[in-house]
Amino acid sequence: MTESFLHYLWQFQYFDKKELKTTSCELVQVLHPGMRNTHAGPDFSEAKIKIGNLEWRGSVEIHIKASGWNDHRHGDDAAYEKVILHVVWENDKPISRSDNSAMPTLELKNKVDPSLWSTYKKLFTSAERIPCSSLWRKVDDLVKLSMLDKALTQRLETKASVVIEMLQRNQGDWEETAYQLLSKNFGFKVNTDSFQRLAESLSYKILLKHIDQPHQVEALLFGQAGFLEKVRIDEYTRLLVREFKLLEKKYGLESKRLHKSQWRFLRLRPANFPTVRLAQLAAVIHQRKNIFSTILNTIDFKDLYAWLAVQQSDYWKAHYQFGKVTNSVPVLGRSSIQNLIINTAVPLLAAYAITHDYHSYMERAVDWLQQIPAEKNTITRQWTELGYTAKTSFDSQALIELYIAYCMKRRCLDCAVGASLIQPV
């Protein structure tokens, strides 16, 4: 037995309520089970319960065994003085309040259909990555859709919270925050941390001062990233090294510079080398100033896509690394641009919507997701195997969140799909 399962039983009242009595044989009538409390204090607040002839309003505390009350020292905590009912699976010990009066206790052990616990245990202990995989097809489509809507909302809020934390560190500067987030996502998972550290060490305000000089923007990015140390010299790199030495001294960047060893090349396709991605980021910064305001004021998804569809400088169309010539280097591809929109533009809009209470920006973020094809990765492929194929990024983002936040953590009771499988017949 788990307390989370008992919380679920109490919240939805999935137990036999006929002749419900406390352990001291007083009749119990649940008028309202209360509101689930996810913070410190009793498990449910604002409950309304009739015990004997008296109607009580207050909190409900839940334990597997009654002795848990003493084990957790609730009797010494003022927050528990308003508890009107102690709900337990097993009443192993009489419990008293701080004034020595008996605590009304309700034992559920013989009031619950055994099949409920059996189904929950099967899901909770399932060896499958998606616990309900064997039962997924039996769940009503409306239940699935409602849960996916909830999962997507949660994912947008989670991503927005990351943006808001960055915004606070940047003292409310949305442009600096947008630049840092965009830079981070140019790492495309493998080099995400390095790109983020680079952006945090090289202010967007500095880059904006040189935005009309593309070679200076590249010099600042490649130099601060550590790629101009012991580099193969040609005409292009000679220019960048010279420019960076001057700019590094001017802006006092020496102590913040990254080292070349912090970047990963191993097992990456050349088109995804951090040098190429840095050149593409430099092109966005040079050609598309005011990152945040542009995203905020762009309505049409096609315009946003075109805004990110830049081409790196000529040198990086023929080089994957400094001094190593190759036939052709791809420009920023369709899937990469879509990835940047999903992980940069959408979270920025969501964060702005939340901080300013402008719901229209959240609606636009959702609309953009619905215009991007679904992502294909190890998580979405698992759902495809169950017969649920994502069509847009709205779907794939929801499925990713459902898997990470619920399936992996075995939070079946908090999931509409899991909950629909664990209920009385």
Image (spheres, rainbow, N blue to C red):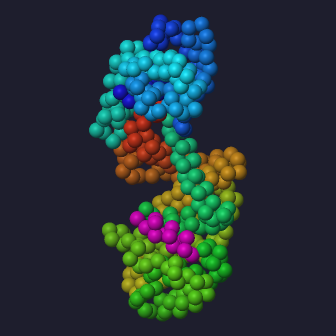
The residue positioned 40% from the left and 88% from the top of the image is 230
The answer to which quarter of the image holds residue 41 is: top right
The residue positioned 50% from the left and 59% from the top of the image is 339
Q: Which residues are magenta?
A: 190-202
| Viewer-closest of 407 and 104 | 104
The answer to which quarter of the image holds residue 200 is: bottom right
Which image quadrant: the C terminus? top left
Q: How many marks?
A: 0
The residue positioned 37% from the left and 14% from the top of the image is 110
Residue 194 in the magenta stretch? The answer is: yes
Q: Residue furthest left?
A: 127
Residue 135 in the magenta stretch? The answer is: no
Magenta stretch, main secondary structure, is: helix
Residue 281 in view: no
Residue 117 in view: yes
Above or below, comparing residue 244 to residue 99 in the picture = below
| Viewer-closest of 118 and 2 | 2
Above or below, comparing residue 29 to residue 414 in the picture = above
Which image quadrant: the N terminus? top left
Above or below, comparing residue 362 to residue 328 in the picture = above
Residue 305 on image: x %, y %: 58, 61
Above or below, comparing residue 407 to residue 62 in the picture = below
Residue 370 on image: x %, y %: 56, 47
Residue 328 on image: x %, y %: 42, 77
Residue 296 on image: x %, y %: 67, 58
The residue positioned 61% from the left and 10% from the top of the image is 54
